[in-house]
Amino acid sequence: MSKEFQMNQGAHVRVAQLDDAEVLAVLSYEFNHVQVTSDHVLSRLSSGFHTEIVVVGEVDGQVVGFACAQVLESICYAKPWAELTELYVQERYRRRGVGRGLVRMVEQMARREGATDLLVHTNNVNIAGQALYQSMGYAMQSHVSLQKGLIPP
């Protein structure tokens, strides 16, 4: 499988590289409003960790979006599955196929790792994101997400 593929309008998607660390830290903050340093991103990318898929989308040579996914296994299931944990494209570069390309590449890489399904979590008010996923064949599921902080304030 190729580590990169072309899309329309000067856009393409590829596996994240070490020299993407700085822009990934910036894009992650734009998306999540959680500050991570480029050193942290570089450390994760260079550690050879194999549980996370990280891909970037470029337009005219500039990284404008990214996606992250995890391939997971459990004693409770016969086959691994994947979860798309992040998908972000800067607003001015949306509707050019970058997000769709990022998801497609994650799907290919997760399939190669043996995942039988890709689970996507998105905010219930993210109507555009839901429309993208549904247009790509994803079906709505009825789940409730709950979260608890594990580190005392």
Image (cartoon, rainbow, N blue to C red):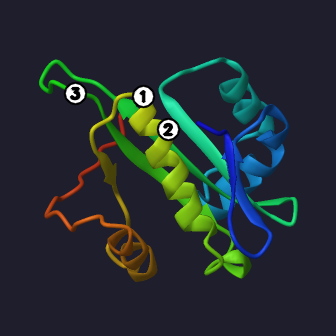
- Specify the amino acid type for callout 2: Met
Front position in the image: 39 or 118: 118
Residue where numbered disc 1 is placed? 113
Specify whether 87 is left or right of 28: left
Secondary structure of residue under mark 3: loop
Q: Residue at x 67, y 39 (%)?
A: 3
Q: Residue at x 82, y 44 (%)?
A: 22
Sequence order check, earlier mark of 3 and 1: 3
Residue 151, position in %: x, y? 41, 32
- Specify the amino acid type for callout 1: Glu
Q: Quadrant of residue 15?
A: top right
Residue where numbered disc 2 is placed? 109
| Cα gap from disc 3 to disc 1, whole angstroms | 11 Å
Front position in the image: 15 or 46: 15
Secondary structure of residue under mark 2: helix
Residue 142, position in %: x, y? 13, 64
Residue where numbered disc 3 is placed? 79
Q: Are marks 2 and 1 in contact (CB under 8 Å)?
A: yes
Point out the image quarter for the N terminus.
top right
Number of residue marks? 3
- Specify the amino acid type for callout 3: Lys
Residue furthest toward the front? 1
